[in-house]
Image: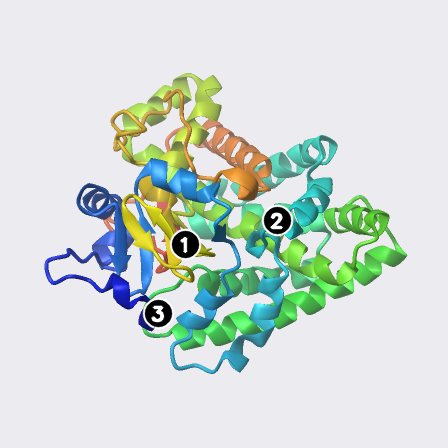
Amino acid sequence: MNSQHKNTAVKANQPTYDLFAPSALVNSYPLFKRMREEDPVHYSESFGYWVLTRYRDVEAALRDERLSSDRTALFINQLGSLDVKEIQNFLHLISKMMVEKNPPEHTRLRKLANQGFTTRALESWRSIIQNTTDQLLDNVQNYGGMNVVSDLSIPLPTLILTEIFGVPETDRANFIKWSMDIATFFGGAGGSNLEEFARKADKAAAQFSALIRQLIEQRRRQPGTDMISLLIVAYLEQGFNLEELPSLCIQILNAGLVTTTDLISNGVNALLRHPDQLQKLQQNPALINSAVEEIIRFDTAVPFFFRIAKQDLTIGGKDITAGSVIALGLGAANHDPQKFDSPSVFDITRSPNEHLGFGAGIHFCLGAVLARMELTICLTTLLRRLPNLSFAPDKQAIPTKHNTLILKGFDSLPVKF
């Protein structure tokens, strides 16, 4: 894509920032701070896209109708030398997703998707979340330690979502793998094995779609109270094509699985690294709601979201040409001192806390209520049942984080109790 933007050539004295540097992957915020102070609307020659790091620019961009959510061009650009035929299943799936749509198509799909997130449905999930959290903690209670990621933050949203969608137990292991494979390529993975990520994502898209279509067919014959059944009713009532339903189901499943997984591990890590805040929460459990908001702000699970400029525009004094890719730095915005007092301080009583962890505008996260509910119940139960939670010895110095731009969470987080 770089060739389109000759007018944005980097000047010799312009700073460069490596978003994939090992130190930046572990802790991106010092780099975001530098970018925000030195070049808040930065054109990255190496990536071929613009990066926004100020709160006001990011929030405005999230609501800007001149920016398109359809990122097909970005995925093709990511392929490098790989033939676009290699990701046809992936592109077919993504192209029908609500997150990739602009109005009026987005408005129509969003209205339908909301049918799966009624207050009644959400309340019925509360007991599923509580029971699942308790079961997972029962499994490790007697061992004196666990890996937060493999023992809690991956299985919890997986079990909850598969339950909500009525996915058979025999398919649940595949389901996690497919979600992760799609999310890794979707998330703008770095490194040299991008072609492998692309092929895995394409294969996962085909298998995932086949399973969801099979479940839709079953629920049409035997409707239940699960999410797929609710959505089928909504689609048929509105006279919409059920062909679009697999993409919506997979978007809800993927977003709900991967981001909640990361929020839980990021949250446990933030609390353990700030013992004063952990103690404050243990002494006053009623602070859990504001603690959850601060976790989402402090270590954002989705630090970037991409948009494509539909026309020439100017952001922060920089001229951006139509067709340019723009990375909206949600994580950087959530640490902007112009918006948040002492943004690098983790404060579970922070108020107000208008973070952008779930985005803003028409694409505000559909599953935000469910994610907050999962995080609240999970952390409340964890701290009540394991009051002596701490990092496992020798492990706290090396948290391992994903190697993608869009998704930030831990691959491993060992703790003892």
Q: Earlier in the sequence, mark 3 or mark 2?
A: 3
Q: Amino acid at mark 2?
A: Pro
Of 327 and 255, which appears nearest the observer? 327
Task: Determine which of the numbered discs, if any, sits on residue 4 in the image.
Answer: 3
- Counting from the top left corner in percent of width and height, residue 102 is at 58, 52
3 vs 1, front mark: 3
Residue located 75% across and 64% down the image: 213
Residue at x 48% of width, y 25% of height:
289
Q: Measured from the top left, where is residue 119 in percent x and y? A: 70, 31
Front residue of 146 and 125:
125
- Residue at (19, 41) in percent of width and height: 37
Relative to 354, does residue 52 appear above or below in the rendering? Answer: below
> Which amino acid type corresponds to the residue marked 1 in the rendered image?
Ile
Label 1: state its secondary structure: loop
Which residue ends up furthest to the right in the rendered image?
Answer: 221
**In terms of sequence position, does the residue under pointer 3 or pointer 1 come before the other?**
3
Label 1 Cα neighbours within 10 Å, binned few <14 / some 14-19 / many ≥20? many
| Relative to 186, 280 lies left or right | left
Q: Residue 35 location in percent, x, y?
A: 22, 47
| Secondary structure beneath label 3 | helix
Residue 103 bears which disc, if any? 2
Q: Quick one: label 2, few (<14), some, or many (20+) residues within 10 Å?
A: some
Q: Are marks 3 and 1 in contact (CB under 8 Å)?
A: no
Amino acid type, callout 3: Gln
Q: Which residue is mark 1?
A: 406
Q: CA distance from mark 3 to mark 1?
A: 24 Å
Residue 272 in picture, x, y percent from top left: 32, 35
Q: Is residue 228 visible?
A: yes
Tell me the quarter of the picture where residue 44 sits: bottom left
Crowd around label 3: few <14 · some 14–19 · many ≥20 (10 Å): few
Q: Is 394 displayed left or right of 159 in the figure? A: left
Mark 1 and mark 2: Cα distance apart in space: 23 Å
